[in-house]
Structures are given as C-alpha cells and as structure tokens.
Image (tube, rainbow, N blue to C red):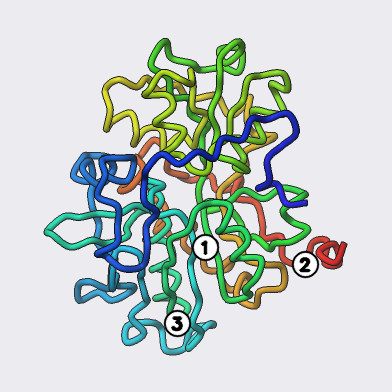
Amino acid sequence: MLDHLAFGGIHTDTRDNGVAGATRETSHLSKSIDRRGFLGLMAAGAVLTPLFLSGCGSNGGASATSAGTATADSSDSSAGGALSGQKLTFVGDDAFAPYRYIDETGGSQKVVGLDIAVADEMAKRLGFTYEFEAQKFAATLASVQGNDKDFTMAMSSNEEREKTYDFTRGYYQPLVGVLTQGDKVTSVDGLKGKSIACTTGTVQNKFVTSVLPDADVHTYDDGNQCLQEVLAGRIDAYVCDGAEGVSMQKANDKLTLGLLDRSETSDYVGVYRVMAVKGASFISAFDECIGQMLEDGTIDKFIGKYVGKDFEWGDDTSAAGSSTVGDAADSSAQ
C-alpha cells in the first residue's frame, strides 16, 4: 500500500477551507490570500528572488504558457541529447515554495522555483520537452504511477515507495521544520504534548507518526490547510519541509520556525529526488544529468538562489546517494 494513504491512528481532516485548486488556465487560479497568495507576494524577497523560467529569455530552456503549464523550448534543447524529442509531464503542487510556486511579477503568472530550474536545465541538456501540471500531493503520486511519461520532484525514497517508483540520486538535502505561534521547537521532545498538523502521506507525516506514535496528529490535503489551522490556533504545530517553513515564516510574522537537527530526522527524511513509475525509460538519463549538475555546481547555484546558501551542497555531495533504478525490480508486481 502506498504511503500517501492516511496512517493508522491519525485524524484525517479533509474539510474544505475555501481555497480553489490551481488549474492549467490562468483565469481560473485562486485569488484568495492563502498560502499561494502570500508566497506570491513574497517572491521579491531575498530568499525567493523571482527567476522566470529560463526559456522566457534568449537563453532557452522552459517557458510558461500559463501559471499551471510549462513546456520546454525544444528550439534551444540539446539536439543530440539522450532524451531528444521525448515529451514528458512534470506533475506536482504549484504552492510548494521554494521548490514550485507561482510568481506574478510584471503582471504575468509563471511557475518558478528550485525544481523548475533543475527540470529546465535537464530539458536543455538532455533534449526533452515537458509540461508542468499542477496537482495536490496525493493526486501526484497516482498520476506518476499511472503514466510512464510523468515525473515529479522533491520526493524522498523509502522501501515502500521503491516497490512502485524509480528515483534518481538526490539533488537537495532537506531539513524538517516546525511552524508554531509560540516557542521555537528544535527537537522531537519539543513536539511532545502538542497537536500536530502534517500534509497527508509526506515523509514529514511518516516521520512524526514513527517517532511520536501517541501524538495528536491531524493530516490535511495540502500545506495550506495545515498552515491555516496553526494560524487559527486550532493546531499547535505544523511539521513541514524546512525550506517551505522558511518561506511561510518570512511571509507571516505571527509564525515561529524551528528546524530539527538531521541527526533526529535522517532515518525518515532523505534527500529529495526525481521520481517516476518503476521502469520509466528516462530516469537513468535524469540521474546521470543530476550527477553532472551536482559536480559542476549548477544545482548549488539554483539552491543558493531559491533556498539560500546555507542549504547548498558545497564540496561534499556524497549524501546524494545513487539512483534506485534496477533495485527490487520485481517488487512492483506484489
């Protein structure tokens, strides 16, 4: 069973908070001031300096045709690339700053972020084109499983996921963040006795239920709902991706962000990778390309721009690991 399903003993709250989901048409995007809205407003900040998709200028890469759709510019892709001529779909949440979010600078709407920058660079080097399709987390996993031309990013691998999906090596080392309206929480012990929100099925969700099996954990469809519950005072803490937490805290001075030490989280929250259904033909090429981008400093350049220099790899990329392609080859049939 895939781990995007609710775990035993967790309260799954799916109530509608009035936030319209992003669609692939600009005119249908939610205009409410929710997580997507205030992350867009902060796009001019130091951490999330806006970078339009590289194909919007003369350098090529990928260009956004609407806020929910991005396609690589094949005229500037490598003609001899390993994936030349292939058309893929990148599915994922477009309100997951600094990895993927909507930038409205200049009156237009573009999906930008670390993941988009990495995907654009892979498209340029490998010669493929891609379309970005905005989806919530649970729908993303199902989409990737059902189509061998789909991929997603900012995913950690684990034994359960590797039965169904293939992963590249890691391109980013995340931290686990804790957003509260009270004292800063920087350890697992600091979460004890608190009501906790998580996005259903994320590695942060699984981490919390593993290390605090008796905790009062509430799961929600997306991070926006988790955030609103904390802001409303109904939930004490939102356990989230650390860089996402940085973005949220910078946008709302009511929030306090603590970052857990990797020594407490590394067994549950691994490096972020590109993920596709097991057997997808392009993952090996993606993995090789990411290795080159780690070596030549391209990924650190993107991390420095979108996340911050404190999150860069530097000279040691050993924690990136290796691709899972070929591992447990027959397990997906179970």
| Residue at 26% from the left image edge and 22% from the top image edge | 253
Disc 2 target residue: 326
Residue at horizontal 39 percent and vertical 76 percent from the top: 124
Compute the Cα span from label 1 to label 3: 14 Å
Point out residue 171 in the picture as x, y percentages from the top left corner.
Answer: 52, 53
- Give how far across and how far down residue 162 sits, in percent: 74, 56
Q: In terms of secondary structure, where does tag 3 sit?
A: loop
Whichever of labels 3 and 2 marks the residue nearer the N terminus, that label is 3
Answer with mark 1 or mark 3, whichever residue precedes in sequence. 3
Q: The residue under label 1 is which amino acid type?
A: Ile
Circle 1 or circle 3, nearest the eye: 3
Residue under the point 64% across and 34% down: 266
Inter-mark Cα distance, 3 to 2 = 24 Å
- Residue type indicated by callout 3: Gly
Say which residue label 3 marks.
127
Name the amino acid type tagged 2.
Answer: Gly
Please state which of residues 106 and 138 is positioned toward the viewer in this rendering: 138
Question: Which of 296 and 290 lies nearest the eye of the viewer?
Answer: 290
Q: Is residue 10 above or below residue 137?
A: above
* Residue 48 quadrant: top left
Q: Is residue 283 left or right of residue 235?
A: right
Numbered mark located on residue 290 in the image: 1
Q: Quadrant of the C terminus?
A: bottom right
* Marks 1, 2: nearer the viewer: 2
Q: Which of 55 and 169 is in front in this view?
A: 55
User: Which element is circle 2 on?
Assistant: loop
Q: Total of numbered circles in the picture?
A: 3
